[in-house]
Each structure stands twice: as structure tokens, then as C-alpha cells.
Image (tube, grey):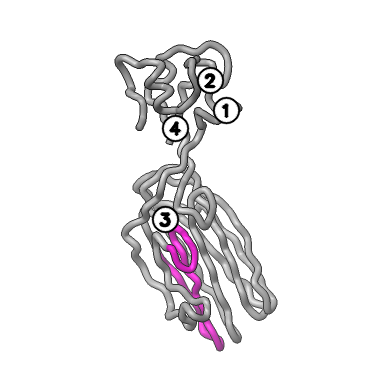
């Protein structure tokens, strides 16, 4: 429970929020102190919404590693957004999807690719502006790379690719928060609490442990 932003604030309220030992001393409550009482970021859950757009037919089902674009996933792993899209025998795989996020912060990307000597791209956009682009080439194996981008609550995230096949080709994209397979994002908190030096009760207005 976040401490009040104004008004009366007591030592016991600070201890109640951040935990600690008795007798209470403000020196226990430096931000990012060795005792871990006052965090710099805290994890908050992300809920995506409004999945829109289109993709090519997935030529593999879940039993063979194929998963259509989806948000707020738990299978095959936990992500804000996920697709594992497969093409075969010269067909072209495509994804042009958007979704909306509800948290501000840094988001993580996993991009994986399997093919017989072909190259695949991945473009990620925020409100229509490109924030990530990469290509991978794979020779009968899965290769991967990672990245990050920043977005604000209410932003629309876009996922775009078009990839070839000759035999099986698999395009994997995971979007998450603190990692590509997490639906939590690290949110900065306790900006007014010092890491050292003088402390006063007013430094703890709006402070939070979780």
C-alpha cells in the first residue's frame, strides 16, 4: 500500500510499508540500501488489449510448435505478445499485428528464426514509428536475437514481418516486460528518497515497497 502523498506521516507508517526492525530509524530506509527495504523499481503486471490485424495461415499446430499471434499468453510461455508462425514448401509467412499496452517502461523482444538458408526480418513499431528492426539468417537450425524498446501506457505496438520458406520456416516473436517471457515491467518508484545523506519524513511521501 503506497504511503500518502501529503499530510501526516509517521515512522511506523514507513516501517509498515517498507518493513524493518525496531527501534525504527530513518537510516534504515535509504533507496536501494543494502537491506533491500526501499526499492528503486518495482514490478507491475502488464495487460495487453485490442489485438488486431492479420497473419498468414500457420502451417503448424501447437503440438508441432505453431502458435498464432496472441496477447497475455501462458502457453507455450508467458508473454505480453507471442507468435510462432510456420510456412512451408515455398509459401510466404506474414504477420501484421497491433496491440495496446497499459504500462509505461522498457519492453523486451525475443526474435527467433528457423529455415533452410533464408533470411527473415522483424519490425516493431510504437504508434506507427519503428523502434526495432533486425534480420536473421538460419541454415537448418534456429537462431535468435533480443532487443528492447520503450513504450507508454496506451501506446499501440505493431509487429510486422514477411518471411520465405523452402521446406519448413518458423518465425518466433515474443514481447515481454522485464524479459521477453515476463508479463511484469519494472516501474521506477521512490524518486524522492535519497540513497545517502540527510533524510526527512517528507522524502517518503508517495513511497512504496511493491
| Magenta region, residue range | 74-97
Q: Is residue 51 magenta?
A: no
Indicate the position of residue 1 as horizontal and vertical percent values: 35, 32
Q: Residues within 10 Å of mark 2 (few under 14, many from 20)?
A: some
- Marks 1 and 2, how far apart at CA: 8 Å
The secondary structure type at the circle numbered 2 is helix
Indicate the position of residue 121 as horizontal and vertical percent values: 57, 67
Is 83 left, or right, of 3 in this rendering?
A: right
Residue located beneath label 4 in the image: 209
- Marks 1 and 4, how far apart at CA: 13 Å
Sequence-wise first label, 1 or 4: 1
Sequence-wise first label, 4 or 2: 2
- Marks 3 and 2, how far apart at CA: 41 Å
Are the residues flagged by discs 3 and 4 in contact, CB closer than 8 Å?
A: no
Circle on res. 151: none
Residue located beneath label 1 in the image: 35
- Marks 1 and 3, how far apart at CA: 38 Å
Is 210 left, or right, of 34 in this rendering?
A: left
Q: Residues within 10 Å of mark 3 (few under 14, many from 20)?
A: many
Circle on res. 28: 2
Sequence-wise first label, 3 or 4: 3
- Marks 3 and 4, how far apart at CA: 30 Å
Amino acid at each position: 500500500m503506497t504511503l500518502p502523498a501529503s499530510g501526516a506521516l509517521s515512522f511506523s507508517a514507513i516501517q509498515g510499508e517498507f518493513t524493518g526492525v525496531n527501534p525504527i530509524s530513518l537510516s534504515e530506509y535509504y533507496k536501494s540500501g543494502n537491506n533491500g527495504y526501499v526499492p528503486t523499481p518495482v514490478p507491475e503486471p502488464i495487460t495487453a488489449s485490442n489485438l488486431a490485424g492479420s497473419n498468414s495461415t500457420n502451417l503448424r499446430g501447437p503440438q508441432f510448435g505453431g502458435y498464432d499471434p496472441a496477447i497475455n499468453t501462458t502457453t507455450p510461455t508467458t508473454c505480453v505478445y507471442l507468435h510462432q508462425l510456420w510456412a512451408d514448401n515455398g509459401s510466404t509467412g506474414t504477420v501484421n499485428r497491433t496491440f495496446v499496452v497499459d504500462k509505461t517502461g522498457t519492453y523486451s523482444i525475443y526474435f527467433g528464426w528457423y529455415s533452410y538458408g533464408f533470411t527473415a526480418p522483424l519490425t516493431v513499431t510504437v504508434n506507427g514509428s519503428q523502434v526495432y528492426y533486425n534480420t536473421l539468417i538460419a541454415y537448418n537450425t534456429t537462431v535468435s536475437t533480443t532487443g528492447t524498446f520503450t513504450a507508454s501506457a496506451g501506446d499501440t505496438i505493431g509487429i510486422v514481418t514477411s518471411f520465405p520458406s523452402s521446406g519448413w520456416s518458423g518465425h518466433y516473436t515474443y514481447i515481454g516486460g522485464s524479459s521477453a517471457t515476463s508479463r511484469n515491467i519494472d516501474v521506477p518508484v521512490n524518486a524522492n528518497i535519497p540513497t545517502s545523506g540527510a533524510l526527512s519524513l517528507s522524502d517518503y511521501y508517495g513511497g512504496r515497497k511493491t
